[in-house]
Amino acid sequence: MSTAKRRKVKKQKKKGIKIRFLKVLPFIVLAFSLVFLLYRTIVLVRFKVDCTSIPTNMLSNDKDMIANLFIFENDGRISNIEILIHSKDKNNILKVSIPTGIYVSQVGVDEIPLSSLESVGEFLEYGSGKEYTIRYLSDLLGIKFDNYIWLVDSSRNVEDFQKDLSVWSILFNFKYNQELKDHIYSNLPIINLITQINFLNTVTGEYEYEVMDISECCIEEIVLSDDDIQLHFDTNAFDSEFSKYVGDLVSRSVERERVNVEVYNASNVTGLAGIYARKIRHTGCRILRYDNSPNLFDDTVIYVPESEEYKNSLRLVRDVMGEHIEVKYEKPLFITTGDIVVVLGKDLVQ
């Protein structure tokens, strides 16, 4: 065979190999892509969100008015607190921004800024800082949260976190993935958390939302000296301001029932009726009266003589009190006028 023919055969072989390679190249790329996607999907599924810190009975199960608590921590101090309350029925959203520099009081503890709540909780009981903080904020505001999202060692604010969190960012943004890994605490697994955040992004983009700024409505200035002023949380001012928004958040089914709730303290702890009445009021139910019971009772009971007429309101009251609380479809032994009557027993403080 001549040299020219050998060269021609070699060229044809090389050309054939090249053509075959080009034919299988898309399949190779597809195979590698599928393997990579499978690997990153496993990473997503196995992405751990620490949800062991907070007992589930501290959280609300109400799916009509959902309160999401965001807490961002930086350098060992709480740097950002924001609450997003969404009305599923009316597609309304309320944003509550809470400055972390305002001071609050706690029994047995000096007045402290909100930024130090976790540290106080850790001081009182090691390992309970996050639970203490969320419980304290729930009592301070009179709101039972449905979800909490706590991000540690992050300079992000809530808007950046909501904007950046997605399935895509967890799958392909390695830097963001590492930033979140072992730094995020929530009652929601990662897929549920992403779904909830994306849902909030959608509704805030499509619907009007209200903003309640604590610094503008609910702060009392305490003058300590000529050049030292402390900002304190004003509970009464907060309740008054929050009541302006509840009507736009409560479900229509609860609105139609127009329930009147009475709360009576039958325990031996003072002030309990006011605490629970406030939480029930913030669900959108009307509090007709709260007072001390004529007698002490061991167990907490919810009385509702006409349960069918107030079934949606009863669901909210039970959510505040706890699903384990007994419900009796009758009136209590002492005289009351409420549609739903809550008698707080000694079991609440045991």
Image (tube, helix red, strand yellow):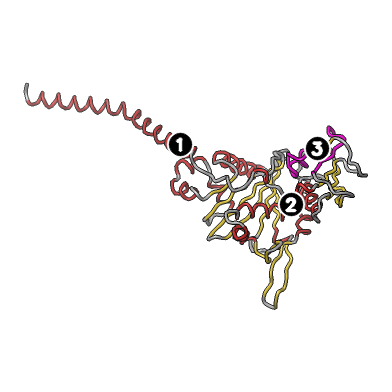
Compared with 304, 226 (above or below) is below
Q: Give the amino acid type for the residue marked by disc 3 in the picture.
A: Val
Kindly report which numbered mark, 2 or 3, lies closer to the viewer in this rendering.
Answer: 3
Q: Is residue 88 left or right of residue 28?
A: right
Q: Is residue 208 visible?
A: no
Indicate left or right for 86 with 252 as reference: left
Place residue 310 in its image quadrant.
top right
Residue 17 position within the rendered picture, expressed as x and y whole percent measured from the top left: 23, 26
Decide: few, some or many residues near mark 3? Use Cα within 10 Å; few <14, some 14-19, many ≥20. Answer: some
On whether residue 325 falls in the magenta region, the answer is yes
Q: Which mark is residue 142?
A: 2
Q: Dot 3 corresponds to which residue?
A: 327
Query: Nearest the camera: 234 or 162?
Result: 234
SS for tag 2? loop
Range covered by the magenta-colored residues: 299-327
Residue 28 percent location from the top left of the image: 33, 30
Query: Circle 1 sits on which residue?
Result: 42
